[in-house]
Amino acid sequence: MTPFLLYALAGAALCSIGLFGFILISHLLRKLLAFNLMGSGVFLVMVGLAQHRSGPDPVPQALVLTGIVVAIAATALAVVLIRRYYHLSGKTSLEDPAQNPPPAPGPRQAREAPHE
Amino acid sequence: MTATALLPVFALMTSLTAAVIIFALPEQKHRLRTFVNLTAAILKLLLVGLMIRGVFQGKAYGIAFPMIPGVEFVLRADALAMLFAGLSAALWLLTTVYSVGYLENSPNRSRFFGFFSLCVASTLGIALAGNLFTFFLFYEMLTLSTYPLVVHRGTEQALRAGRTYIIYTLAGGAVLLFGIASLHVLSGDLPFRPGGHFADMAPDLQMPLTIVFVVLIAGLGVKAAIVPLHGWLPVAMVAPAPVSALLHAVAVVKAGAFGIVRVVFEIYGLETAGALGLLSGLAAIAAFTILYGSVMALYQSDLKRRLAFSTVSQVSYIILGLCLAGPVGVAGGLVHLVHQGVMKITLFFCAGNYAETLGLHRIDELDGAGRRMPGTSVAFTLAAFGMIGTPPLAGFITKWTMGTGALAAGMDWVIAVLVVSSLLNAAYFLPVLRRIWFGEQKDPWREERQWGRSETSAWLLWPPLVTAGFLLLAGLLASAPFSPLGWVELIITREVNL
Amino acid sequence: MTLWLMAGLLFTPLAWAVLTLLTGFRRGRAITWLGIVIQVLVSLALWAVVAAEGGFQYPLGGWQAPLGIELRMDGLAVTFVLLTALVAAASGLHAGFYLDPDKDWHRYFWPLFWFLWAGLNVVWLGNDLFNLYVGLELISLAAVGLVALGGQSEALRAAIRYLMAALLGSLAYLLGVALFYGQFGSLSLSGIASALNQDIAVEGSGFALILMFFGLALKTALFPMHRWLPPAHGIARSPVSALLSALVVKGSFYIAARLWLELGATLGSLALAQLLGVLGGMAVFWGGWQAFRHSKLKQVVAYSSVAQIGYLFLLFPLTWNTTEAVIIQAQQAMTLQVISHALAKAAMFLSAGNLILSVGSNRLNALAGVSHFLPFSLFSFGLAGVSLMGLPPTGGFAAKWLFLQASLATGQWWWLVVLLGGGLLSAAYVFRVYRASFVEDSDIDHFFHPSRRLEIIPMILALLSLGLGLMAEPVLSVMALAFANGEGT
Amino acid sequence: MITASLLLMTVVLPLGSLLLAFRQRWQKVYLYSLPLLPVPALLAGLNAELQNWLELPWLLLDGTWGLDDLRQSFLLLTSALWATAGIYAIGYLNTRKLRAFCVFWALTLTGNLGLIISVDLASFYSFFALMTFAAYGLVVHEGTAEANRAGRVYLTIAVAGEMALLTGLLMAAQHADSILLTELPGAIANYDRSWLIIGLLVSGFGVKAGLPFLHFWLPLAHPVAPTPASAVLSGAMIKAGLLGWLVTLPIGELSLPGWGNTLVVLGATGAIGGAMLGMMHIRPKTILAYSSISQMGLITLMVGAAMANAAQTATLLTAITLYALHHGLAKGCLFLSTAIKMPAERRSRRLVWLLIGVPGLSLAGLPLTSGAAAKLAMKDALKPEQYDFTLAEHLPLIMSAGAVATMLLIWRFFWALHQSVRTGPNHRCTWLGWLFATGCSLVAVWFLPGVWTHSGQPWFVLTASEGWSLIWPILIATAMSIGWWIARGRKGSGVD
């Protein structure tokens, strides 16, 4: 039971919690947070598992760095989309519009906002 | 690759390029389109004629290149191929002429003629295909290119007919594909070869081969309209007359029959097929189809539907002929490939003329049509008598040859089938003739179109007359060297080698 | 020589992405077309090289793995590179005419387009699992952005849904990567494979494989996980849909296929193989049925993608411990299916776009009487349809034929049902479109003829997918090179 | 050479004449050309050298045409009959549906002549079928409901007959491995299932020959046709069936008593039953039709005998030929006479009645007529002692009964004709045709080959010397009809 394995298990736990949230939560921002949680979980697993060989291993660090960058990019894109979506539809989740009638259009000034 | 090797490709190309050009032409350029059509048709006829001469002198034309790993694309011009190719080339020219007249100032002509050319291209491809795979390739191409022709009118009825047609044919195609694929797994890529490939097969192959044979026949039988796979044929009658003529005489139905010929002769080989006990079963089905089609035809009051059922019955003559498995009987079957084509196309041309000129579709409207349209009616009469098998017309040659073959093969019951079906043919054709010639016209024609002194447009009148002439000559000069019978005997001596 | 080619292949897309980011739509278009020319030439050259000399490894910038990035350039990869070049070029050109320059957000099409292309090339060439991950992410993010270009809220909804699915998928994949690295301390496929060959499979590494397959299947929209695809592909602008259906989904599948071919023999199991195959089969039927039911043209096409992707997954059962010959056959079938589907589907989406442009409606029955006007696009659509139906002589048929051969050879006859039945089902929905266009009752007189430039592009693609069946032999021979010189499978 | 061209012309001329049907306004010309159509056949019959086959290798399945003495006499009879009927038709026909009539006339003519000159099976069957189907056009020409019904019956039975023929010929040809008619009898003779083939052929041709139980169409169809058509139908075409029998059945090859009996029974039934049925009718043409059945019945007797005893074939064939010739011509001119209108003035009317009467009596075998010759020939051909099959000894009885029946029927005909005849002028050609026919039947017949002599002395003399044996049936019949006439209380009698 090395500490590294502990990290790995913690990572796995984070992962599953994140997954749990990612699937169950319908609010988009929280979904996104859940995703980030998962992401960190995965990174933790990566770093943790890689250590059990003799000596520290540079490769996972590099990988995780890259992974974090990718995750940030993804998050950024997601945030932009969600924001835009909210402005257009005034909704914060993805239920089928068929189920609930088309919502009142989002905040007007946001619609006219030139930078959108 | 010499020019002779490419001759089949050129022949194929003529109609393909014609199709492309026609699709590219704007709708209203009628003269130009007609010109393209006719030139292509004539050119093709010439090329095929060249090939026929070459094959007669024993030349071999062909081209082959690998397509998919383990499978070749093979075009080959042997005598059997020429039988079918010659038929389709000759009848294409006539049908083109006819359709030009038939579709005068109707919409979507450019679409029609485009697919029409495609359809003929695939027919030629089927004729020239050198192995089952290539055959299948063109077989499916035919299916696709005929669909637009069937639904050409775009009416609800036409669309429904098209649906039935496509369901039947595609399903049949799938079955056929399965058969071909399994055969391929069993014994690799099989070129068509006289005598077939399984003359000396391993005993453990017998069972799978039998199954595969059944599957293949089932797949091909859809197009050949073998009962109970014939359902699409009568429905497809809503298509314009030239299309029905083509479907019945050359293209679709014949493709199926021709495929069966290829499979029986050049994949399995008559002896093997007989040894596996497959021919007798096939013969039984064919005989049943013959009788069933004729009986059904009796009950049709629509002229084209009656003709359709008569096709169902007539095409199975070809198959029955094969099953006689003797040189003479086989000759009877093969020669019917041509004879039935010529006769049936004549009948459909005439039916189309009645519909176009006088607006007659039902048989009981035909009273006295003979006096109004003598030319058409003479053609119709000749063809009808040919179907009945009256000498000296083409149909008689078929029946006589098949009959002799049946006796030679000791399958006397076939004679009974022939006689009964001839009686039935007489029973459903003679009344029509009686109405045409001896019926007193009761009420004015439905929608009559005047063409001055002539009974109908020359475009419509001449094709049936010419084909009627063919079927008369095919019977009268049956012993001449280049008559269908003569050619078939050449095939048999050369390729079927019985 | 190859150095320059590789450099061109990988860096022009990125460079062009940055360039076009700085310009407006019209200038971006001009720049892009230049880039397209370069890319196509480069890809052709590389293909020629590989065809002549066989595949090779290419350490990027001279740094060796694991820290450096090592690219593998084998026949399969280069074939897909060339395919990408073709389809992307076609979509790019088409988009140039198709997209409305006056909608300012359309300018973002170009950079996203280039990022996508870059990502694809990375995936085709990537040799270690992590690079593949990066490539996947690049693809996903660019694709999502492209979908979002639709503008209205529906598009965004689809985009977000897509994004979520993609993210989940890539995380699952990344987790798998982590586990692998933890076990074998190597990221390169070949490294892991050799490690596996030395000591028997470590328990649990099967789980990693399953995780990765789950992630990739999610991104490839395999049957139960396909829900995100139809809205996204349906709502996106036609050139985008073309790119997505033709290439993007293939990216993730390609990785799955490589994993399976190299690790499957040891880590995989009959159950897994059959499961994937069955899911594929269900995808074929379900997708076909949905396509048959839907009344919106692009929805039909999108669902047909679901169905067509299903065929790809027959690769797994057909390569599970059988003879080398059959494995090759199945791989060839898979490749042909990928190529022909890519070409056909791109042609279909582009021509569908033209048709919608012409009749001004996305509905199927709005096509009534269209065939009056002999629109080129209808023919392109039809030809592509022929390929989807798997009728000769199209590439779709060649693929189906090889699949048939493989499944008969391995005695797994039940896949015949999928192959033949699926073909008939696809015929059913394709013919629904034909039928609609042949209806005569409505005499529409308004028909906007799109410019020939728009119509010729899908036609070319369709003809390519048609000719593929006749040309299958040479294409496959190049593809087989990699298998020949050991590298890869 | 000359033979070849004549034979070809026999078929080509009538077929070529169809070209005249292209223009409505040529129909008169066509009508006037009708008598010329059979001329080549006539010439061929008169001066073609026999047994000289004309090979037509490309025709059908290797055509062979030619004449032997059997065919020659049939050809002469047929062509002569068609020619005279053609002349008659010119006067008889009104302009309505003229073109159609001419076309069917020409076609039927072609068939009828062609089947006589064709030696190979395919062309024989072709011409036979052509004749069968074209004759339908003649039968229904009047277009009346009765005609249509008759036509339907005719066609139904005819098609059935054709099929029987096709089957029989097929089997025969396949067994003979040749399609030369001359080969068939031998082949059939030594074929284990010859009974089947013979049965098919007998019934197939029997339809045409008015064999009992296959005859139903005949009394319906012959009368409704236009008179000249009836003449050829009953005079010539009915003989086509007979010819069919003679050329295909294994006559002279071997003795088949069984078939002999069958045919004799059928023949007797036809000869007597036909006459009896005929007595029921009052329309002259119908009566004549029945008389044809009865006469063919007598011929069938001879055919049966020939089947029964190969040794007698030669004599029987001459007798049959003679009988056929005589009956054809006589029946022809009787039919023609049914449409003759009586001249108003008395003496010439007597003359006409005489001219009508003599052929009638010749049918019954009046001495010095061809009928007498035929009957004598039949008598000594059918001497019972030459045969050993069961019914042989009844033959004389049957023949005498037949003769009586014939005579009765003739009286009935005269009476009916007398009832229905009208007075008025006749078209020139009507006279001409009828006189020609009568001339042939009374005079020309003596100059036909094979008719001239029998065992050294000329028939003409024989008929006189054998007078009594011929006269008594006539007398009996006359007596019976007079009795019947008295019984009916002098209400309208036979001749006045």
Image (spheres, rainbow, N blue to C red):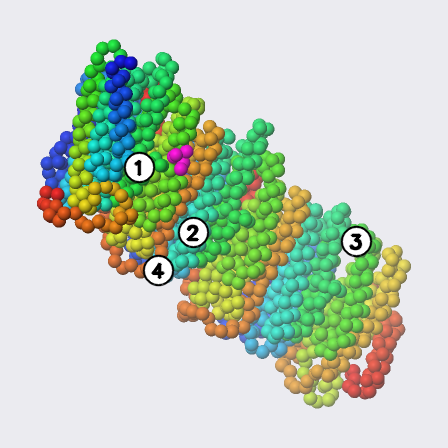
The Cα atoms of the two marked residues, 3 and 4, are separated by 76 Å
Residue type (three-letter) at the residue carrying disc 3: Gly
Q: Name the residue under label 3.
A: D252
Residue, x 68% and y 71% (percent of image)? Answer: D220
Does residue C399 appear in this view? no
Q: Residues within 10 Å of mark 4 (few under 14, many from 20)?
A: few
Callout 3: residue from which chain?
D
Tags 1 and 3 both on a single chain: no
User: Magenta stretch: residue C280 in it?
Assistant: yes
Residue, x 54% and y 49% (percent of image)? Answer: B228
Disc nearest the viewer among 1 and 3:
1
* Left or right for D223, reference D483: left
What range is drawn magenta here? C278-282
Q: Mark 4 points at which residue?
A: C441
- Label 2: state its secondary structure: helix
Q: Name the residue under label 2.
A: B163
Q: Name the residue under label 1.
A: C342
Tags 3 and 4 both on a single chain: no
Does residue C103 appear in this view? yes
- Label 1: state its secondary structure: helix
Q: Residues within 10 Å of mark 1 (few under 14, many from 20)?
A: many
